[in-house]
Image (cartoon, coloured by chain):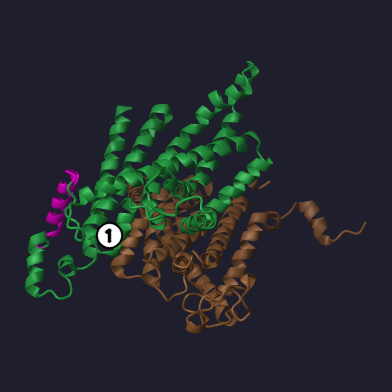
Chain colours: A green, B brown
Amino acid sequence: MLVFILKRLGLAALVAVTVSAISFSLLFLAGDPATALAGEQATDVDIEAIRRLYGFDRPVLVQYWDWLAKALQGDFGESYYFKLPVADLVLQRLSITMTLGVCGISFALLTAVPLGVIAAIRPNSLIDRLALLLSVMGQAMPSFWFGLMLIVIFSIQLGWLPPSGTKTWVHFIMPTVVLGYYAMPAIMRLTRAGMLEVLASDYIRTARAKGAGEGRVLFKHALRNAIIPVVSLAAVQMGFMLGGSIVVESIFALHGAGYLAWESIGRNDLPTVQALILIFSMFYIVFTFLSDVVNAWLDPRMRAG
Amino acid sequence: MARTADALLEEIHGPSPAQLLRRRVFGHQGLLIGGGVLAVLFVVAVLAPYLAPHDPYAQDLLARMRPPVFLGGDWDHPLGTDHLGRDYLSRLIYGAQVSLLIGSVAAVISGLIGTAMGVAAGYFGGRVDMAVTFLVNVRLAMPVVLVALAVVALFGGSLQVVILVLGLLLWDRFAVVMRASTRQVRSREYVTAARAIGCSTARVVLSEIMPNIVNNLIVVATLEMAHAILLEAALSFLGLGVQPPTPSWGLMIAEGKQMMLFEPWLVTIPGVALFALVLAINLLGDGLRDVTAPENRN
């Protein structure tokens, strides 16, 4: 188990370093950062001064190493636009994105798992077909359009929910639904497939044969085993979700990290963009690492691979 | 009892593989509906210059925000006009061109990259496999929307840039699926036989392995095409994809958003078009998977 964790940790670290190199090199894709920073009326002297101030005159590898070393200590440099430390900015905005992510994945799990279980208990029934239809439709619906439609219906026409802002939990209802529905189809399909497989297995027949009640068979014996792959899928989806919250945050004007990313891209605020790409990637890497470890702990067969 | 020669032959030999395939295809509702809708949208996109009632770029500031027919408009502008007086139906029709072009070219680019990586990983195994798996991990760790937005912002939003960025980002599923399929096929007798008689690696891969995994490739390609279309719309909606005045559906939704309070149809119409196109492609992809999956071949 320890060997597995160490191996997996090594891989995660290697992925993290590669991602950091890619997000760092974004800065140089943009052309000369000093010229961009100096603005249009800058003279050559100004540009040269800025180049020295920000250290752009050093070799790229040195700059990368410097940036990485500081990033590891939680220092992502200063935002070009806000003139504030990027780390503070991001930290301040991250709570909204995290809240949204947790709400979104909870919503997806709470709706998709029961639907998947019911669909598996009664395959080809009306509910099964309805769930399938829902998942096919869900995958085809553009999330930003879905969000706008919810605003039209629930904010403009019915006036039930606020269209934007983060003041109360009511403000989070529509963003949660829009962020969460995207993860639902995959979770539902996996729950259904897992339950179908488990329900056909010998130990379920044994449990039934010894007279266990149907509820006990379903929840104590079947769901516990069928849910394992769902947990790891949910972890991966959570990582994707945080990265995808940029769309949802921009529709509902939630000033979280995704919104900050969108603003910063528009303002060419590269240190902030780099930091956010790196942080969102880290979330994904940590979540997948944790889910692999939990899986290996629950299922010893995983440790071999 | 009069029997046709064909029926008699079928009774003797059993149905041919082609006949079986035809039966599976025509017995699959999702595949037919998806394929049908996609075919119609494709024809609409190709014939856009003949079908569109107006020039999609022509502004008529005296005829701004005309409602569509079903909301009391007239037949000169069946789907009304936008905030610059441009005919909404014409923009919708030309928008199909943009979506289909971006979706298919991006899917081809990412398909080439992902297939090359996946087949190499599955066929050679060992270090190549490790390297490819690592690259897929790196790619999955990067937030697609964020990276795409940032790169498009750096290079400026144009059709070519958006296509290239999406093509270079969406190869992960191709690589994963092609790797798994190649590993399955690679240990079959016919591959061993081809290698035993001295076929080159290129020949083994191209004429023994590829034909046997191409069905999976097509399924992934349809799904990734849908994915690319959705992403393009999202990028354009956020203002960092295809730039105005190009009639992109995502851009139309973004422009309609300003007037959404009073004219929700400005957002509803392009959204429904986008939804229908992506749904059709997904249905087609799911259907193709069903009819080509070996376990359904009885």
Amino acid of disc 1? Ser
Could you say which is closer to the camera, residue A102 or residue A67?
A: A102
- Asked whether residue B193 is in view, the answer is yes
Residue depicted at x 42% and y 46%? A172
Q: Name which residue lies at 56% across and 78% down.
A: B48
Which residue, given by chain and number where applicable, does mark 1 sit on?
A: A264
Would residue B182 be counted in the magenta stretch?
A: no
Q: Quadrant of the C terminus of chain A?
A: top left
**Percent x, y for residue A252?**
41, 55
- Observer-nearest residue: B280 or A42? A42
Q: Residue furthest front?
A: A159
Which residue occupies the extreme right position in the image?
B1
Measured as percent of width and height from the top left, residue B16 is found at 71, 55
Residue B38 in which image quadrant: bottom right
From this viewpoint, is residue B120 visible?
Answer: no
Please identify the dominant SS of the magenta region: helix
Image quarter for residue A253? bottom left
Indicate left or right for A92 with B296 as reference. Answer: left
Of A173 and A104, which appears nearest the observer?
A: A173
State which region is magenta.
A57-74
